Image (cartoon, grey):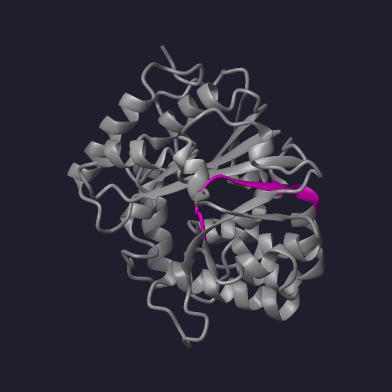
Amino acid sequence: MDIVYLWCDLQDAAFRAKRAEALRRAGIAVNEGDNGACRYRSNDELRYSLRSLERFAPWLDAVHIVIDDAISPPAWLKLDAPRLRLHRWSEAIPPEKLPCFNSSALEFFIQDIPGLSERFLYANDDMLFARPLEPSFFFAPDGWPIYRYSTSRLDMAAPTLADGYLHRVRESFRFAKANFGVAGGYKRAYGRLGHHNIDPYVKADLLAFREAYPAIWDMQTSFTFRDRRQLQREVLAGWAFSRGHAHFRSIKRPWWQTAFGLPHRDSWHCIPVRDDIAAEFARLKPSLVCMNDSPEVTDEGRKAATRFLETLLPGKSSFETD
């Protein structure tokens, strides 16, 4: 089983210039929420995610890191690490769909990454393993993915949602209900906010979605930057549920498991605007952490997040240069 990361860094001069030119051609003013700098900034989270992978999920095989054709990989990344597979987006995306600075579109090309295993995990570069996990955390005994959801629910009746990401997630649920139906485990998932963390996928299901809904797939992958008309990858989970190829889990553990010292949450979505990251981590005992940069995060918050990650995951991994 492989894992896929998407990575970029706005500090890279060539990537920054390419993005600025694409914004100019599209006539788009930077929207701090959807297309702002925080969506492209690297705070070295990938370094710590790879450390967490090596420590807590050593059973993973190839580690695929996909980057823009213009960008240089992280200076600390050991390019000849045995498990590392570094890809450029032109290996998976047709020329007419490039350039693309839109994760909501890029995620629909993951199944086309060369050499990717049939069952794989997908992570943003700010998502980490936080304790020892087995493949059974991500895939049920029948081989199908386990998708995790929080207890938070979206307003499914409102005509629109102010937050672009939440709006796209809500529209993904609506599309799934209209086209796939809501049955089985998806009844419990419907309308809940996904955990926004490391998720499992099966290539055959993603390819089947593209074959069944070519017009939607083409629309989804045609936006150079994020757009409210798009869907989120939540729709792919809905598609898997509709085929009987997915299982529902809540990220919050039952009280009795917490009482016995087991993790309070399977997944923690942390926006580092607080000064008690370590204390909250100790309280929740999560299995996965997403250290999510956002418009409200300051440089001080980013430094605090790095200090926490260095304490949690000290020492270099085999993916780092000497």
**Residue found 36% across the figure and 34% down from its top:** 44
Nearest the viewer among 186 and 110 is 186
Q: Is residue 303 left or right of residue 268?
A: left
Please identify the quadrant where the N terminus is shown: top right
One can see residue 125 in this view:
no
Tell me where residue 170 appears, x and y as whole percent: 53, 74
Determine the image quadrant of residue 96: bottom right
Tell me where residue 268 appears, x and y as whole percent: 43, 47
Q: Is residue 82 left or right of residue 208?
A: left
**Residue found 20% across the figure and 50% down from its top:** 298
Nearest the viewer among 193 and 125 is 193
Determine whether 231 is above or below 306 in the image.
Answer: below
Q: Is residue 31 magenta?
A: no
Magenta stretch?
194-204
**Residue found 62% across the figure and 22% down from its top:** 83
Please identify the quadrant where the C terminus is shown: top left
